[in-house]
Amino acid sequence: MKGITTRKSMRLFCRGAYLLAFTIPFIGGTANAGFFNNRKSLDNFYLNDNKFEIADSNSDDGSLKESPEDELILISEIVITGLEDHPDKVRLEYAAYDAMSIRPGSRVSRLEVKRDLNSIYATGWFSGLEIDPVDTSLGVKLKVDVKPNPVFTEVIIDPSNSILSEKVIQEIFKSDYGKTLNLNVLKLRMNKLKAWYSDKGYSLARISGPNRITAGGKVRLRVQEGSIEDIQIVFLDEEGNTVRDNGKPVRGKTKRWVIDRELISKPGVIFNRKDLESDIKRLYGLSLFSDIKVTLKPVAGEPGKISIVLGITEQRTGSLTGGLGYSGSQGFFGSAGLQEKNLFGRSWSSDLNFTYGEYGALISFSLADPWLRGDKYRTSLRTSVFISRDVPQEFRGSKKNILGVSDYYQVPGSSSSSTVYDIDFAHSGINSEAFSSVPLAKASKPNTSWFDYEGDSVLLQRTGGNFSISRPLNGGDPFKRAPWSVLLGMDFQQVKPIDYSSKDRPYGALSSNYSNNSASNNDVICIAFNCAKENTLIGVRGAMTYNKLNNRGNPTSGSFLSLGSEQYISIGKDSPTFNRTKVSYSYFIPLNWLKFHKDCRAKRGKNSSCFQTIAFQLKAGSILGDLPPYEAFCLGGSKSIRGWSSCDLAVARRFGEASVEYRVPVWRMISANAFVDAGTDFGSQKNVPGNPGELLGKQGSGFSVGSGLSFNTPVGPLRIEAASKDLEGDWRYNVGFGWKF
């Protein structure tokens, strides 16, 4: 009795409900010691939810039969044996005693003994039990001989080619190695394995076992990860039907390979819920489909395998657009366009656009392939051809402009004055031969208007095309979000300065200083390179970008870097050679200073979705070589220094800009912003051929302070801003789509 007395008050923490599939028959006589006169050793076990059962019928060998009045037996002593040399003897004894409700001196029924034995097994520490009841003068001495689980040494995953790495297995099980195996703890670790699969998106993964536990403590677990048998594409109509009203099946326009290349999920790979969700987002991102229904179908006779069925409804991808607007270069303008986003079912985007404005016009056609077929880097291609006419902002000022003229005559022997004139060759009859002076032209035919100066603004007619390829630096993984990307391209243009009637205007004269058919030499410049009637520009360009913005359309954190260079190559005397390099860097810091909007007042424990930030931008550029003045950098405008109109601050070879902007949501779809912009030409205006910037009185450097409101629209934020020049009270108002940066 001493042994049980010293232990009867012991209590342990390990109480489990995960049991083994064992059956212990309790066979006894009809009285006292005979109550438990048989025992059974349990050498093999399996992990399931069965409990111990006691035989419930009398047999010829004296087995006890259930009776309405089950006999109560006096328990004199309880002894746990089988742990004499075990390293965890104390812990396991505590676990066994603590699991039992029977105490010495109590009268118990067979059912109560059965329940306590089940409780001992439920601790998870033991693989077998033997019951040895002994009659004593004081009652029944109950000896419970336990067989402890082996020391846990290793987990073996079956099959061996599972996606589980040894690192993951070690992280989950290493704390249990070298200790007696507890099946309840093993179950908890198996749940962690299941959680790892679930967190990684492998929602079909199942873990069972242990299939086997060796005497050396090696536990073998079975993993069924769930694989994709095949992927089926089914096209649906707007109502979700696979068959149209005429009985014909719905056939999609989009090529099957266009859909397949957007899918990480492939036949033969392990199913991953997160991958499938990303696949669906990418398919929607193509803007080709209005609805995508996903169905997972188990494969008959193939446990753990599924088929993915994508029910796809295509949307209209062609559109005809038109509109009216205003810009600094075009004035008031109207536009019309025809777009197709799925040309030939290949996800090619084509755009035919026509714009006609107060000061110019544009006809262009572009074609873009967002992902070249068969390319693992997700390389895209874009090409376009165009013809345009526009008023170059480099030759316009807030108070005076540079106007185009067809020829320029300098009085011989004079450098201070000149004559600007346009001889109407169409009426001269001299086959485009220019006279040496206006008076000679007038004297030749007094009744002919030789001088035809209209005072029109300079127009540039550009005819050409370009193509470019771009590639993210993803290492050959098309689904990896790579911050770095590169672009290579080539441009070809014929540039011709003209007037509104399409007459050549290779020269320009300052409007404010032009009178009596003459102007100062200092007020006359070449519009094109080499004073030619037409320039040929052929260039190659390269660019790199680094994008770590959290949101491309409305960023609140992260950074963006862009570096680009264009090299133009001469192919003749009127074809210039020059290089233009430009760099831009933006950085965003999330804030939560002002809490006007409800999303900036998140409740405790919930994440804030406040689109509030302070943003910084630096830009710089330089041009080397034979620069045509119309290719110079422009400072000023809604994308530059906002206190000045487009190109009204400087026309430069070099420039630097800096901006700081604070953005905060105010109400629903409305945000407010405050900003400071500054820019300089580093004194490079005078190095632009013809010096148009200083001729027009552009100051070269300045800063602006302003604020505005933005309205979130489906096509981006609509900005309305007011900015002051140098805090002098001269305000400019901007209206445009998209943030400045």
Image (cartoon, helix red, strand yellow):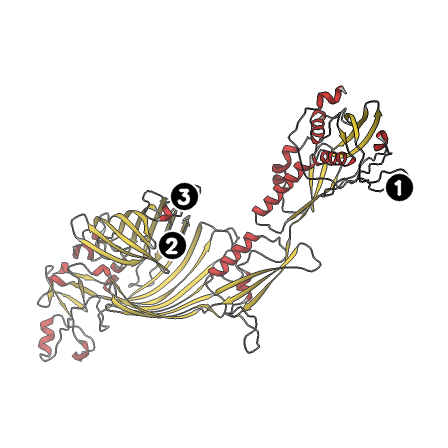
The three-letter code of the residue at mark 2 reads Gly
Residue in the foreground of this view, choosing between 559 and 684:
559
Q: Residue furthest front?
A: 69
Q: Is residue 559 above or below residue 452?
A: above
Circle 1 sits in a helix, a strand or a loop, which is it? loop
Q: Is residue 655 above or below residue 219?
A: below
Residue at image location 58% in from the left, 47% down from the top: 198
The three-letter code of the residue at mark 3 reads Lys
Please report whichever mark, 3 or 1, sits nearer to the chain's N-terminal start: 1
Measured in 3D between alpha carbons, the distance from the residue under mark 2 to the one under mark 1, in whole angstroms, is 83 Å
Residue 688 on image: x %, y %: 23, 55
Q: Are marks 3 and 1 in contact (CB under 8 Å)?
A: no
- Camera-side mark, 2 or 1: 1
Q: Which residue is mark 3?
A: 603
Residue 156 on image: x %, y %: 69, 41
Q: Is residue 9 above or below residue 608?
A: above
Residue 59 on image: x %, y %: 89, 41
Residue 558 in view in this figure: yes
Q: Which quadrant would residue 168 be assigned to in this image? A: top right
Q: Which residue is mark 1?
A: 59
The three-letter code of the residue at mark 1 reads Ser
- Camera-side mark, 2 or 3: 3
Q: Which residue is mark 2?
A: 553
Measured in 3D between alpha carbons, the distance from the residue under mark 3 to the one under mark 1, in whole angstroms, is 70 Å
Residue 215 in view in this figure: no
